Amino acid sequence: MQDIPFNQPSLVGNEITYLKEAIERGQLSGDGYFTKRCNKLIENLTTAPSALLTHSCTAALEMAAILCDLQPGDEVIMPSFTFVSTANAVVLRGAIPVFVDIDAQTLNIDPKKVAASVNDRTRAIFAVHYAGFPADMEPLAQIARENNLILVEDAAQALGSTYKGKMCGSLGDMAAFSFHETKNLISGEGGALTINRPELIERAEIIREKGTNRSRFIRGQVDKYTWVDIGSSFLPGELVASFLCAQLEMADEINAKRLAIFERYQKAFRQLEMEGRVQMPVVPENTTGNGHMFYLLLRDAKDRDQFISHMRTAGIITPFHYIPLHSAPAGMKYGQIGRADNDLPITNAVSDRLVRLPVFFGLGTQIETVVSIALKHFR
Ligand SMILES: *Cc1c(COP(=O)(O)O)cnc(C)c1O
């Protein structure tokens, strides 16, 4: 039997045609024809007033951290249960990630823990939409308003998800998306920053273009461009943008396919969940997901590790994550635990118990093999 990977990139439409067109158009550097088309498509998909393509979500988070004007010693509240880039963006500015626990049902940042961790040095909240399910943004926005904090969405996994009828990427002051090949829409490496506060847009363009006002120059608003602020090279080239453009055009189809996979897994494990043997993702009230991920929470670390090796023996790759950032070497060095907790018990337990099943566009009838072999673990 052939191995079933956890993830596999797929061509879904016009990728090759657009790559060829990008080459024929004669501009391979960034901010050309396809980058503009991608920005527009992302604005449409998120309803954000401005989207800027970046070379990764990591880059978009770093831009967001610069736009927050973080100073050394400033604090940013975030979950510990996230990818390293959420925290690195803050640490690179000399600021301190303050890790708080997640909600046991949604695995998203717990607004009560956020509220308890705000102090005079807090500047921002970085909320992650885990597994593509939106964090509870309304209470977070209220905490941000009351304390004059910037609210950033780490929407790496959440393109197309909605919260109370609004799109992820339009909920915070800014949002960072990923088009890494493990996400729903892909360009190998890739990302975008959406900006919902109009007064931040011009500075975002400058930061993304190495601290120059080149974007205004290209639009003919200034007659030469120069170094005006800090920045870096956060933009992708046109080859990446052309590939991504084809994927963005198929966003609805890609997400629908993944949601169908998600629902197949839900159906397969419902009985075990009712017996209390496993926990499946809980779709938070008034939200819709995008089928980014399907996970199971098993009994404990031993049960989870046995599940993973059982699946591996059958050639099926089912990874766990995350090592909680507050317990990682760099997390202990650069971050701290929030003021509501001494430790983060839910984060620790979820990290021990979680396993992810294969979800990708090209996963066809193989899903039935995944399901039947997975169910054997419980018999
Ligand atoms: C994937 C991911 C990132 C990083 O995305 P890149 O595009 O690989 O830089 C950041 N945060 C979260 C929550 C992610 O899932």
Image (cartoon, rainbow, N blue to C red):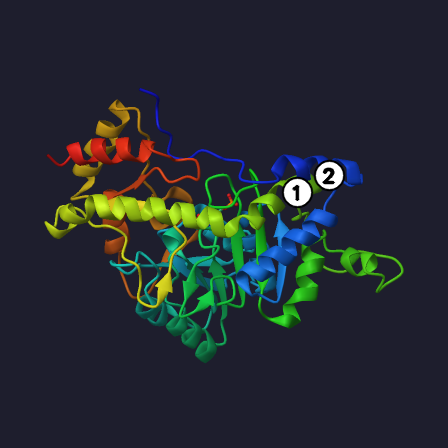
Dividing the picture into quadrants, the one containing residue 375 is top left
Q: Residues within 10 Å of mark 1 (few under 14, many from 20)?
A: many
Q: Residues within 10 Å of mark 2 (few under 14, many from 20)?
A: some
**Residue type (three-letter) at the residue carrying disc 2:** Glu
Which residue appears farthest toward the bottom when viewing the image? 146
Q: Nearer the viewer, residue 129 or 48?
A: 48
Give how far across and how far down residue 45 sits, in percent.
54, 59
Quadrant for the N terminus, please: top left
Q: Are marks 2 and 1 in contact (CB under 8 Å)?
A: yes
Q: What is the spatial separation of the Cα atoms under label 2 and label 1, in whole angstroms?
A: 8 Å
Q: Give the secondary structure at mark 1.
A: helix
Which residue appears farthest toward the top when viewing the image? 1
The residue under label 1 is 242
> Residue at (79%, 40%) from the top-left corner?
25
Q: Label for residue 21?
A: 2
Quadrant for the C terminus, please: top left
- Residue 242 at least partly seen: yes
Give how far across and how far down residue 279 sits, in percent.
20, 50
Counting labels gives: 2
Give how far across and how far down residue 206 sits, in percent.
71, 58
| Residue 2 falls left or right of residue 156 | left
> Residue at (56%, 65%) from the top-left corner?
47
**Residue type (three-letter) at the residue carrying disc 1:** Ser
Which of the two labelled residues, at mark 2 and mark 1, occupies the earlier sequence position? 2
Q: Nearer the viewer, residue 283 or 310?
A: 283
Q: Give the secondary structure at mark 2.
A: helix
- Residue 332 at least partly seen: no
Q: Nearer the viewer, residue 97 or 42?
A: 42
From the viewer's perspective, is residue 28 above or below residue 216? above
Give how far across and how far down residue 35 sits, in percent.
68, 49
> Residue at (28%, 61%) from the top-left corner?
103
> Residue at (16%, 32%) from the top-left corner?
376
